[in-house]
Amino acid sequence: MNDVVESSHVIKLPIDKLALGMFVTAIDRQQSKVDILNPGKIKHQDAIIKLKNSNVTTVWVDMQLSSSNCGLIKSDTPNDFVNPLTRKATVTRDTRQLQAKNLLAEARGLIQKVLAETYEGKAFDITQFDGLADKMIETVMDNEDAFKCILALRTKDAYLLEHSINVAFLLITFGQHLKLDIDVLRQMAVGGILHDIGKIKVNDAILHKPKKLTPEEFEHMKLHQYFAIQIMDETKGLSQISKDVCLMHHEKIDGNGYPKGLKGEEIPLHGRMSCIVDIFDALTAERCYKEAMSPAAAFKILISLTPFHLDQSLVYEFIRCIGVYPVGSLVLLSDQRVGIVWEAKDRDVFHPIVKCFYSLKHKRYTKIAMVDLLKTEMNIERGITPSSLGINPAPFY
């Protein structure tokens, strides 16, 4: 049994205020503080539920060790005053990249499993997505840069899988930017993962056609939303928010969308967000029938679709959220070097860290160099795409 001790970076919170990303050091037992044998960050909602079921009413949280976006305002106490025994171990970028790859592999495997079950007419267990959604939320809350770079490594053949994962990730990122409740983020993530599930019942020849669809083929493609309605109705435990994200990403503000022709405020916030995210990710992906657009070019199209198709204020908010030069995108610097936007967290959009690997001037690969645009007079000239240069940046991610 310990006396209640609060410092500048360890605070006492009621269990109802506990959120993902908070670092718990102790819990309340019979009005006394009891240290946890394995203190750590809350990674899954199940951990909070278990504490509540164990009649824990109060927890002690270390703000210094908690994720930067968990809702806590961290103390200004210098790190030198933090007990070195409890200081968070530094996680390298390579480690984060590996974690991101593993999470992406897990997501792809789970989506493939559910698509196969759906194709066979089987009902699937929606709860299997809860852990995946929590991991994605934790990644965004902790440091999403590494995951953004992994997501940028896209393949034409796996579009349906990767698009679903990207939409879920972008919805979480956008939702966090809008300060939505973490439970709403989780439900939106599940909706994003499932948002194109109806395409499993679309004719493959049409779904993968490398040319523009005929009007008749496009009408058949639109059926994927009607197939999705059937699938959603048969899926037990799926929240309304998850259903909305899945079934509203082709609706339009002016009422000319599908499947229900919803108009204006009939489309809730999360539905309007899904419209924006779905289009942006589709535009920035390379397909068998089109090249990928740079984010900047995609933003121009999003803006052109306002206000009749997309919510104008939300589009501008999305652009602020993602940034003109998102992590993982390719940019051309003023010295004609090409690089990957590598790190942008807690930086302004025009001064990220760029991983340079190619010279446009000399048309050759160069020695890899990390360029911190806060520490140089160089600047980003413009965003570019790999296809415009005829190069493969994949080995440098």
Image (cartoon, grey):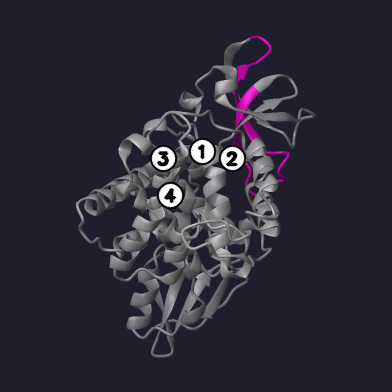
Q: CA distance from mark 3 to mark 4?
A: 9 Å
Taking depth in this image into account, of 94 and 325 the one nearest to the observer is: 325
Q: Which residue carries the number 1 mark?
A: 149
Closest to the observer, 5 or 289: 289
Separation (CA) of disc 4 from disc 2: 32 Å
Q: Which mark is residue 327?
A: 2
Q: Position of residue 310 (x, y in %)?
A: 63, 55
Q: What's the residue at 80%, 29% (across, down)?
A: 377
Mark 3 / mark 4, whichever is N-terminal: 3
Image coordinates of residue 107 in percent, x first then y, are: 35, 49
Q: Amino acid at mark 1?
A: Cys
Q: Give the label on residue 222, or none.
A: 4
Mark 1, mark 3: which one is toward the viewer?
3
Label whose residue precedes the other's in the sequence (1 or 3): 1
Q: Nearer the viewer, mark 4 or mark 1?
A: 4
Q: Which residue corresponds to mark 3?
A: 217
Magenta segment: 338-362
- Earlier residue among tags 2 and 1: 1
Residues at marks 2 and 3 touching, judged by CB atoms closer than 8 Å: no
Structural crowding at the residue carrying mark 1, measured as other residues with C-alpha within 10 Å and reported as few (<14), some (14–19) or many (≥20) = many
